[in-house]
């Protein structure tokens, strides 16, 4: 508050310096009217100019003199002075006029000083009033600010109270729920206690049974351990036997390979012999055909024209010969069929032996891979 006063005074002084014109406040204008306050224009109109007396005509002097003299009786009566001279051409008259004019100017100056002093005092009063109003406004603004702060604090307190009430209501609701949950949990706990007692009884019974069966389990475990050791020994023996069997398998595989090579050689010899047999059979068949042709030719040459007596005997002989030749051909055909059958059987036997050898070789390989 103390810092605001000199700033306002300085602003008022700066405003007074900037505005040299003396303005009358609005609230005082109706009191000081232009008719009540004498101004310089009225005084100048009332007082003649003495510096220009030589240049003024007598008519103008006569016109201005009565206006001054018209004021003399009132002023003289007020000041208790003697009667003014009426001769306009005398020096006393003009001295008297100048004296009255100076008195009027002094009165005007004093009135003007009073007016200026009053205006200045009014300005000072107005500035003091404004300063006091500003101080009052500052005080009120501070009070308003403090009241707003108080109101804000009260609002915040109300908000906090509302929030606390809401939280308390929520907590009460939660508390009711927790109480209900606690009751439910207490009931569940009672049921669990009963179950626990029942389970403990069952557990004690089971433990007794387990203790009873523990010895039996130990005996069974010992027997199983003995069995495992026996199985391990058997496994070692089986591994040894397996190794021996693998050795035998390798030996037999080598032997089979040798026999397969021998079989291949024998099969090649058999195929060669079969081809030789086929060629021999072909030659034999061709020779048989030639012999039959020659026999037929000989029979036809030896045959004669038959007589009545010998006709039946000859025809019977011919029939027997033809029948024998037919039987001979049938025997040849049967022999050919049996030969073909034997050849096919031999070929099938050789194929079966090859298949057996291949299967034995595959089985031996599989055994080697497994080991």
Image: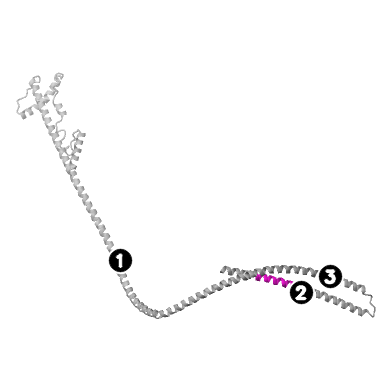
Q: Is residue 87 above or below residue 178?
A: above
Q: Residue at x 67, y 68 (%)?
A: 261
Mark 1 or mark 2, which has the lower sequence index? 1
Q: CA distance from mark 1 to mark 2?
A: 111 Å
Tell me the residue that label 1 is attached to: 174
Describe residue 286's horizontal placement relative to residue 194 as left or right. Answer: right
Q: Which mark is residue 287?
A: 3
Secondary structure of the residue carrying numbered label 1:
helix
Mark 3 or mark 2, which has the lower sequence index? 3
Q: Is residue 198 above or below residue 8?
A: below
**Nearest the eye: 226 or 36:** 226
Secondary structure of the residue carrying numbered label 3:
helix
Q: Residue at x 13, y 35 (%)?
A: 117
Tell me the residue that label 2 is attached to: 338
Can see residue 130? no
Q: Is residue 342 magenta?
A: yes
Where residue 193 sits in the image (x, y, percent)?
33, 75
Q: CA distance from mark 3 to mark 2?
A: 20 Å
Q: Residue at x 8, y 20 (%)?
A: 91
User: Which image quarter holds the N terminus?
Assistant: top left
User: Which image quarter holds the C terminus?
Assistant: bottom right
**Nearest the eye: 336 or 258:** 258
Q: Residue at x 63, y 69 (%)?
A: 254
Are the residues at dot 3 and dot 2 in contact (C-beta closer than 8 Å)?
no
Are the residues at dot 1 and dot 3 in contact (C-beta closer than 8 Å)?
no
Q: Residues within 10 Å of mark 2 (few under 14, many from 20)?
A: few
Q: Is residue 186 magenta?
A: no
Q: Quadrant of residue 285?
A: bottom right
Where residue 368 sits in the image (x, y, percent)?
58, 68
Q: Quadrant of residue 257?
A: bottom right
């Amino acid at each position: 508050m103390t810092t605001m006063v000199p700033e306002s005074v300085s602003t008022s002084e700066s405003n007074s310096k900037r505005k040299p014109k003396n303005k009358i406040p609005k609230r005082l204008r109706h009191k000081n009217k232009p008719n009540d306050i004498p101004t310089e224009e009225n005084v100048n109109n009332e007082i003649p100019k003495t510096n220009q007396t030589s240049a003024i005509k007598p008519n103008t002097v006569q016109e201005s003199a009565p206006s001054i003299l018209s004021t003399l009786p009132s002023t003289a009566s007020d000041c208790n002075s003697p009667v003014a001279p009426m001769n306009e051409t005398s020096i006393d008259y003009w001295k008297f006029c100048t004296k009255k004019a100076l008195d009027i100017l002094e009165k005007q100056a004093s009135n003007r000083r009073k007016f200026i002093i009053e205006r200045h005092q009014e300005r000072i009063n107005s500035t003091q009033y404004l300063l006091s109003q500003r101080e009052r406004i500052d005080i009120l603004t501070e009070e308003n600010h403090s009241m707003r702060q108080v109101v804000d604090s009260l609002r915040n307190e109300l908000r906090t109270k509302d929030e606390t009430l809401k939280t308390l209501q929520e907590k009460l609701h939660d508390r009711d729920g927790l109480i209900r949950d606690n009751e439910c949990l207490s009931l569940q706990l009672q049921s669990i206690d009963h179950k626990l007692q029942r389970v403990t009884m069952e557990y004690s019974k089971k433990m007794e049974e387990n203790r009873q069966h523990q010895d039996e389990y130990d005996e069974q475990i010992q027997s199983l351990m003995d069995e495992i050791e026996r199985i391990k020994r058997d496994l070692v023996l089986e591994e040894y036997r397996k190794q021996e069997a693998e050795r035998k398998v390798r030996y037999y595989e080598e032997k089979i390979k040798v026999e397969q090579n021998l079989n291949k050689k024998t099969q090649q010899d058999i195929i060669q012999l079969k081809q030789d047999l086929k060629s021999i059979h072909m030659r034999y068949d061709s020779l048989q055909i030639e012999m039959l042709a020659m026999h037929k030719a000989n029979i036809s040459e030896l045959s004669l024209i038959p007589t009545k007596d010998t006709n039946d005997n000859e025809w019977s002989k011919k029939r027997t010969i033809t029948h024998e030749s037919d039987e001979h051909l049938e025997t040849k055909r049967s022999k050919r069929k049996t030969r073909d059958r034997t050849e096919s059987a031999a070929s099938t036997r050789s194929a079966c032996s090859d298949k057996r050898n291949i299967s034995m070789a595959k089985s031996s390989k599989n055994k080697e891979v497994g080991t």
